[in-house]
Image: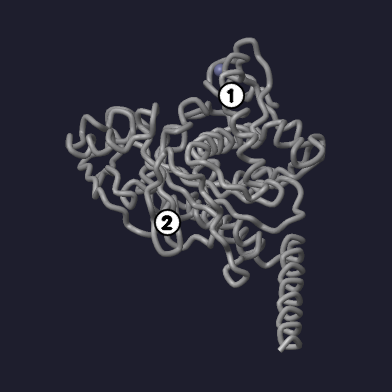
Amino acid sequence: MTKSSDRHCIFCGKAPEAKNLEHPLPRWLLALTGDPNRVVRHGLNWKTGEVIEFAFDSLRFPSCRACNSDYAPLEEATKPIIKALIRKEAVSPRDYVVLLDWLDKVRIGLWLGYRYLMGALTPPSFTINTRVGMKDRMVAVYTIGDHQQGLNVWGAETPLFHIKPSVFALRIENTLLLNCSWDWMCSSRCGYPYPRDVRHSVERTGFLVATSYKARKRITHPIMPGLMKSCATVFQPIIHEGSQRVMHSGDFQYHLLNSWPDRANIGPLFRQFDGETIQIDEDGEPLVFDSVSLKEARRTINIATQAYSLQNESVTRDPILDEDGCVVRPNSGFMRTAAQFNRKKLTMLRGTTPEQYAAMREQIDADRAEKQLRKRSKHNAL
Ligand SMILES: [Zn+2]
């Protein structure tokens, strides 16, 4: 969209070969959720404060033709999974791994897209190709009522996401996906090998040196405390490339025994319930939605804005961050301002009464009326 974006393919980061355009939010998803040409807000330009508004379909960035077609099978595989989730159907463990790959792709695609929109001049330190399936990840699936239409993104517009694209939320019709991914986000609590010491390399700028690996080989429940009750929440730890060299051989053997089929560095899935977390077998039963009672149900906006609080959390858990090779300390003025932006946005959004909330209230009222009616007819029958 801008000159700087023309220089890099969104997938490989090189000058695009046989250039075409990639939609970080794919066209099939735009069409599934409404008119692809609808004009929507894409956040504020931090420099000018202006609202960025344009057609969904115009949110597209240069890519190589070959890179783009490499990801076509992932898009094809994801489409029926999203449709099944919207229908509240159970989805297989293997499909959840496809979904996690796709969410990595969308999250990083949006990050690159928003960088360009905000006028970033430096080349990105990573691209879709170097980030899909590379770091611990999770998705929490929420059903937010029946008759919901449209597509919303939360979290991709924040300064913190610009530095560290680790968390976002995507609402597709009646389904909200909360997606997080950062270094060793869940390894430790999944019982997987994790480094107890992480430092920045003095020899190679932007590289981390992770040592003193340990695997507990048992689950610590909950993997991620404080999440609002979902229909399904799954985690997947991922081994960093090359880390087996500094790991105890027993811990690496543990990974080999548990690794995801045909994916060298990727560990198994873990499903977090209210009272326990269990490891999921790759050929296991499809994951039936956990029921969420009216008492446990939260406002859509509250569920979605977990993206802002989790972005802040992901930063406080990292000792030092990298922004395109530059070291950023979490207690720096810039980081404090970025975290404050998220806190303010979360408070503002949770203070607003959105349409979704009204719909849920209606549902609650209807359920309550139905319950009372049932109670009354039962009473009359006696
Ligand atoms: Zn490319």
Amino acid on which disc 1 is placed: Pro
x, y percent for residue 76: 63, 28
- Residue bearing the label numbered 1: 73
Q: Is residue 255 above or below residue 234?
A: above
Counting residues from the start of the chain, the first of labels 1 and 2 encountered is 1
Residue 232 in picture, x, y percent from top left: 52, 53
Rendering quadrant holding ligand 1 = top right
- In depth, the one of 257 and 381 nearer the eye is 381
Q: Kindly indicate the quadrant of the structure image that contains residue 108.
A: top right
Q: Are marks 1 and 2 in contact (CB under 8 Å)?
A: no
Q: Can residue 371 be seen? A: yes
Badge 1: few (under 14), some or many (20 or more) residues near its Cα, within 10 Å?
Answer: few
Quarter of the image for the N terminus: give it: top right
Mark 1 to mark 2: distance in Å?
Answer: 31 Å
Viewer-closest of 306 and 259: 259
The label number, if any, that marks residue 182 in the structure image = none
Instruction: Say left or right for 131 vs 74.
Output: left
Q: Residue at x 51, y 41 (%)?
A: 92
Q: Is residue 52 left or right of residue 324?
A: right
Figure colour scheme: one colour
Above or below residue 317? Residue 202 is: above
Q: Residue furthest front?
A: 382
Residue 224, label in figure: 2
Q: Secondary structure at mark 2?
A: loop
Q: Residue lying farthest top?
A: 18
Residue located 52% across and 34% down the image: 98
Placement of 11 over or under 26, stated as above or below: above
Can residue 328 be seen in the rendering of this structure? Answer: no
Q: Nearer the viewer, mark 1 or mark 2?
A: 1
